[in-house]
Image (cartoon, grey):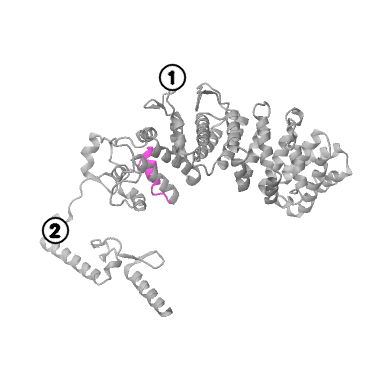
Amino acid sequence: MELGAVLEAVEGRGSSEAVERVLAGYNEENRTIFRFDPADEDKRKKLCEGILNILEKDTKTSCQVACLEALRILSRDKKVLVPVTTKRNMQILMRLAKLDTAEDPLERVSEFPVIVEALKCLCNIIFNSAVAQKLSLELNLAAMLCNLLEKCKDQQFVGDIKCFDLRLLFLLSLLHTDIRSQLRQELQGVQVLTQALESSLSVRWTEEYKAAEDRDRPPLSLQETDCAIEALKALFNVTLDSWNVHSENESHQFRYMAAILRHCLLTMGPTEDKTEELHSNAINLLSNVPVSCLDVLIKPSAQEETDIKYNGMNMGAIQILLDFMEKRIDKGSSYREGLTPVLSLLTECCRTHRNIRKFIKAQVLPPLRDVSNRPEVGTTVRNKLVRLMTHVDLGVKQIAAEFLFVLCKERVDSLLKYTGYGNAAGLLAARGLLAGGRGDHWYSDDEDTDTEEYKSAKPNINLITGHLEEPMPNPMDEMTEEQKEYEAMKLVNMFDKLSRVNMHQIIGLIVWAHTSQNGRDELIKPMGVRPDGTMAPLEEAVSQYHTNKQDSSDSD
C-alpha cells in the first residue's frame, strides 16, 4: 500500500474506520519488514506522529490495536524514533499498557490485545533509542512493570501480557545500569522476578527448597516456556553482581532461586530447541547464584524419585548439566557463548561440593583401562574435553583444562594421567606447576585407585602424549664405534658454537642436531625475548637489547 495514502488517512482525512482499514492493510504488507526505504524516512516520521495523536484520543479497541501494530512495525527503524521518544508519547504508550493506573488493569479481557501491543511497542522503542532508555528511568517505568507483574501473578489468560512485561524488564535491566540497580535494591526485583519464574513453571513445593517431581507431567506450553525464558534473562541481569552473599535473607533468596532452577532443568519445553533455550538460560542464571547456595541442586532423594543417584543424593539436575555440556561440545561452534557458561558452572560446583565432583568424575574421568590411544582421540566426554584443551580460543581451552584439573582435585600427576603432558602444558605453565605439585584449593584426601590394566601399561606410557607406545629402539645400538665418535664430535662443535653466545639470555632447551633428508645439519636454535615481549632467535634478541640500551644512553 502506498505510504502517502496511509499518511493521508492517519492525518485526519478519513474516518476512524477508514484509518483502521488502511492501517490493517499496511500492517499486513509490512509484518515481516525490518529494512525500510531511506527515501520515505520523513513520511514514516510523520506517520508515527499521526498514530500517536490518534492513540492520545479515546477510540475503539480495534483501531487502537491497528495503530499500535503499525507503530511497532515503524519502531523497528531507529531513524524514525526521534518524534516518538518524548515524555508525552512514552506516557501515552504506558497508559495504553495500563502501567500508570492504580486500578486493576486486567479486569477487561477485551483490552488485553491493546496492552500487549503497547508493551511490544515499548520493547522496540526502548531497545532502539537511548533517549527512551533515559526517559524510562525518569518515568519510573521499572516500578510500574513490577506492579503489573504482581497483578499478573495469579491471573489466567494473561500469558502474553506477562511475557512482554518480563521482556521489557529484561531490556531495561540490560540497557540501563541505574535501572538494574533500582530493580535489585529498591524494587525487590529478584523476589518479584523469581516469583514470576515460579509461576511460569507451576512449581509445587514438597518441602523447603525442594519442588515436586512428576515424571508424567506434560511439557510446558510455548507461552509458559517463553515467559520462563524472559524471567530467566531478566533475573540474570539483576543478579550479575551476586557472588558475595552478605545476609541470611539474601542466602535464602538465592537458595530458593536455585531450587526453582533445578526444577527448570528437569522440565521440558514444547520442542527440543525450546527446551535447550530454556535450559541454557537456566544455566546462565545458575552461574550468578553464589556457589555456596548450589547444594540444593542435589537434595537427598527418595527411593522412587530417580534412578540417577550418588551417595543418596538426587543427581538428576547434574546429569542434565552434563548432557547439556556434551551436546554443546558436539555442536562444534560458538563454544565461547554456548559452552563456557556450563563448563564454568560445573567447575565451581565440583570445586565446592564433593558429591557433585565425585559423581561427575565417575562419568567424565572413569578409571583408565585402555590407554592404547591418545587422550584426545575418541568419542568419550573425556576425549572431547581433552581436545578442547588445545582449542584456538584461549577462554575455551582455559575453562576446559580448569574443569578437568578440578576433577583431578588439582593434582598435577592425576591430570597428566588423563590428558598427557602435552595437552596440559598450557594450564600448568599458567599455574606455575610445570614441575608438578597441586593447586591451592583443598580437597578431601580420598585416593584414586588405578586399574590393573593401567598399572601394567604404566611403565610404557609416553608422558607427553599420554598413551601407550612401543619401546623405541636405541639408534646407537646399530652404530659402529667410529660413527658414535663422529656424532659425539658434532655435539661438541654445537656446544662450542653456543658457548660464544651470551648464555644468560637463553630460553628453551639445546636439542641434539640431526641430519635431515637433504643432508644438511639442522639445529633448533635457543630463543630469546625481544624488547616487545615476542620470541626471536637469540642472536637477534640480544642485538635488539643492545641497540635499545645504546639508544637509551644517547637520549640521556
Label 2 – label 1 distance at C-alpha = 71 Å
Q: Badge 1 is on which residue?
A: 304
Tell me where the magenta segment starts and ends, as one range.
377-392
Q: Position of residue 18 (x, y in %)?
A: 85, 38
User: Is any part of residue 281 visible from this angle?
Assistant: yes
In this picture, is 501 found above or below 472? Answer: below
Camera-nearest residue between 127 and 198: 198
User: Is any part of residue 69 visible from this angle?
Assistant: no
Quadrant housing residue 542: bottom left
Residue 390 lies in magenta, yes or no?
Answer: yes
Camera-nearest residue between 123 and 447: 447
Q: Position of residue 132 (x, y in %)?
A: 70, 48
Question: Element at badge 1?
Answer: loop
Q: Which callout, 2 or 1, points at the residue further toward the start of the chain?
A: 1
Quadrant housing the N terminus: top right
Disc 1 crowd, CA 10 A, few/some/many (<14, 14-19, 20+)? few
Camera-nearest residue between 378 and 508: 508
Disc 2 marks a residue whose amino acid type is Met
Residue at the spot 34% in from the left edge and 46% down from the top edge: 439
Residue 123 lies in magenta, yes or no?
Answer: no
For residue 479, the mark is: 2
Disc 1 marks a residue whose amino acid type is Glu
Question: Element at badge 2?
Answer: loop
Q: Position of residue 130 (x, y in %)?
A: 67, 51
Extreme-top residue of the structure? 304
